[in-house]
Amino acid sequence: MRRLAIILLLSLLALTGCQDERQRAAFCENEGVRLLVGGSIAFSYEPNTCQLAFSRDRQEFRAFTDSMSDFFVATFSRVPTTLGQRLTASLTWTTEREVLTRKNLTLEVVRLEGDMVWLWSDAGRIGLTVRILE
């Protein structure tokens, strides 16, 4: 019985890992600035109705609607610059009902293309794409 329980637990962990990897791969395929939380898009940048801001001094990226009703703000421990780089960030974003915050979120740079950076947190199942504006 104990052996069966161990096999079931290992199978469940393997399936969860595959699902997380598929979610991460799907996240990397999208080109736009956005925030993905638990498989749902929490914010998606639209050029006609949104603004972007970046401060190298504050190591902070912001994306927000013109009315500021929806936004996300990422404050990094250091500016993401290289593929595979691991860093921490504080992340704040809006939902339909509230403003949420995650502190000390570990992120990995999973894709770089020009001034665009894709970051992913396996533990938080959070992905964010930012544009480093200079």
Image (spheres, rainbow, N blue to C red):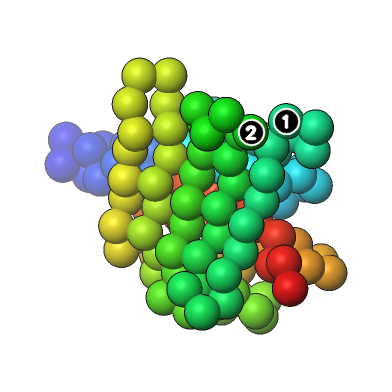
Residue 129: x and y in percent read 65, 53
Residue in the picture at 73% in, 30% down: 49
As drawn, the residue found furthest toward the top would be 96
The C terminus: image quadrant = bottom right
Residue 42 visible to an observer of this rendering: no
Residue 62 visible to an observer of this rendering: yes
- Circle 1/circle 2 CB separation < 8 Å: yes
Q: Element type at marker 2? A: loop
Question: Which residue has dot 2 on it?
Answer: 66
Residue in the picture at 62% in, 57% down: 53
Q: Around disc 1, counting alpha carbons within 10 Å, would you say few (fewer than 14), some (14 to 19), or many (20 or more)?
A: few
Residue 31: x and y in percent read 80, 47
Image-based side of 6 in relation to 37, left or right? left
Image-based side of 48 in relation to 94, left or right? right
The picture quadrant where one finds residue 94 is top left
Question: Which residue has dot 1 on it?
Answer: 49
